[in-house]
Structures are given as C-alpha cells and as structure tokens.
Amino acid sequence: MTGLFIQKQAQILRKIFLQAPRGPLTKVVFDIPPYRISSMSSTANPANPLIAVCQMTSTSDKEQNFATCSQLIREAARRGASMVFLPENFDYIGISTEETLNQAETLEGDLLQRYSNLARESGMWLSLGGFHEKKTDGEKDQRIHNSHVIMDNKGSVVSVYHKAHLFDVQIPGRVSLRESKFTIPGSEILPPVSSPVGKVGLAVCYDLRFPEMSSTLAQEGAELLTFPSAFTLTTGPAHWEVLLRARAIETQCYVVAAAQTGSHNERRASYGHAMVVDPWGSIIAQCQEGTGLCCAEINLDYLHRIRQEMPVCSHRRPDLYGKKNGGILHSLL
C-alpha cells in the first residue's frame, strides 16, 4: 500500500507540473557527411527560441576543426536557431602540452575573427565554449586560459569566462590529465549574459561538478546553464547525464551541454552525448554518435512556472550553510 501511495502521489505531482505551457520538443541529429536527420516533432512553437547544441571530434588540425564548426553553424542557421553552442576545445585538441601552448591565439587573433564573421553571416549568437586563449606578450606565465567566449549576432564578443575548476585527475590505467600544466584557473563567476534565448550562465566542463557555482549563477538570474565539455570515456558513462540533470533540477534552469566525442589522437578520446536538459530534469534533445547537432526549444514561460509552483530558490537556508559574498563577481582563488 505504501508503494502504491507514493507512486500515485508522484503521478499527481508530475501531472501538475507538466501542465505548464511547454511547446513541442524538437530534436535534430545529423552526421557529417552526409547529413542524416531525424525529428521528434514536425511542428515548432515560434514563440520559443530554438538553440542548436553541437558535438564534434576536434584534433590538432585547426583548419579542419573550423570547417566542421562552420558546417554545424550553417546547418543551425538553416534550421532557424537563434544561438549555437560549440563544445570545449572546439578550436583544437593538441597531442602534447607544447602543441597546446603553441597553437593558442589571443581573443584578437585570426580564428575568433573568422567566428565573428560567421556570427554576422548567420545572424546567430555563438557560444564558443573552451577557446585556448593566449595571453598578451611579455607575461612570464606562458600558460593559457580555457575561455568560454560569447558572441552576439553582430560578431561582437559580449562575455569571456575563464574556466575556474581545472581537471587535474589521475585514475591509474584509465585517466591521466593535468590541465593546470598549461592552463591558468579563472578567478570569477561572471554575471549571466542576456541573449535572445534567455539569460545564459557561463561555465566549462569540470565546473559541472561544483554545484555551488551553478547555484550562484541561478541566484544571479541565469535561465540557461552552459557546460561545453570534453568528458572522458571513464567519467562520461558514469557521471555525464546524472550531473547535467542534477544541475537542471536543483537550479530549475535549462542545462545546455555541447560535447566532444570520439578519438582525438592516440592519447585522448571523449564521451560525447551532447544534450539539453529542461528545468524539470528531462532530456529534451541529445546527439547520437559522431559529429552533429541537436536542437531544442527554450520555453521560458515553462521555466518560470516551475519556479513559481516549486519555489526552491526562496526555500534556501543560507543561515544554515552560508551566504554569498562579494556581490555578483565572486573570488574563487
């Protein structure tokens, strides 16, 4: 009887929350080349903006990576997306620390100028998640920043977040990566960016494992949390989906996670499964294997209704577990 009662109550709660005004879900998955397209829905609600979330296999060949990203961006524009999300290391993945450092560019370099041109041509906002940003000449520390760059549809850079949590993990025989050898950790959580698809909170990959960061972004007004990633084949199957859905549920945000997939070189491979999770914790779009993209509608009316009917944020008890300090920009060092 107890089990049946709990099951019935869960069905009632789910019915209440799923009555929120959510438009038809859209999912598109394709590989390059050729395109193979499947759709979850033949209709779309024009009131809800469409986002495109990309999956790719970066290598050390920057030109080939750019060609892949260009195709993905143009396909997203053809399908009517307002904003495109590229994964961490969309520019390249080096085979060594030396190669990683040598190929880095500044924000004013040729590569980001080419993406600026793409943003203008396509008329879309771009989330360039995980750009190897070279610092200005003359600084002693030769390491780079892992930078999440947001461009508007005019090709202007509107925000640059430096990845704060660096992936220094040693699992014998399975994972060995020390990001801090070539990357400087960021020192700020940035304010969410107002975009055509909502207020976007910026993070990168390993930041996903630190819920305090997601909570801070949500409290500062984020409606979408972004985690452009290159999850390993060891951690991905165990933690990727679980963490993304948890962050969505606890913050009542859309979670957008572009991803690297497949073998980058003989030393490194990524899990893939780029996806979008809604504020209820449901996966509403996901890539299959290989290079491609998935699309999803962002229904902010649905998001705000969930927050109104289950006001988790107002139920927080900072008197028990601490308060935010330092205003909207918070030191992480």
Image: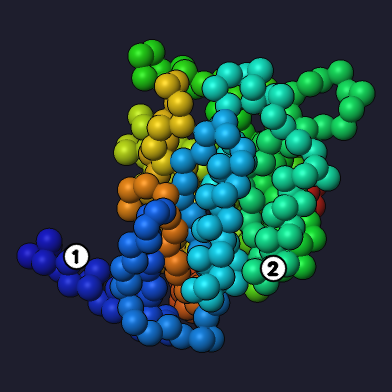
Residue on which disc 1 sits? 6
Left or right: where does residue 255 sit relative to residue 7?
right
Q: Is residue 321 visible?
A: no
Residue lying at the far left of the rendered structure? 1
Q: Is residue 258 left or right of residue 128?
A: left
* Residue 204: % across, % down: 59, 43
Label ID, residue 79: none
Residue 175 at what x, y percent from top left?
A: 42, 21
Disc 2 target residue = 121
Q: Residues within 10 Å of mark 1 (few under 14, many from 20)?
A: few
- Crowding around mark 2 (Cα neighbors within 10 Å: few <14, some 14 to 19, many 20+) is some
Find numbered disc 2 in the image and state the secondary structure of the residue it sits on: helix
Front residue of 147/221: it is: 147
Residue occupying image coordinates x 32% and y 37%: 238
Q: Are marks 2 and 1 in contact (CB under 8 Å)?
A: no
Q: Residue sitting at 53 percent across and 50 percent down?
A: 68
Q: Is residue 271 above or below residue 149?
A: above
Q: Quadrant of the C terminus?
A: top right
Figure quadrant of the N terminus: bottom left
Query: In the rendered structure, which amino acid carries the disc numbered 1?
Result: Ile
Q: Residue at x 56, y 70 (%)?
A: 77
- At which x and y percent is residue 207? 57, 40
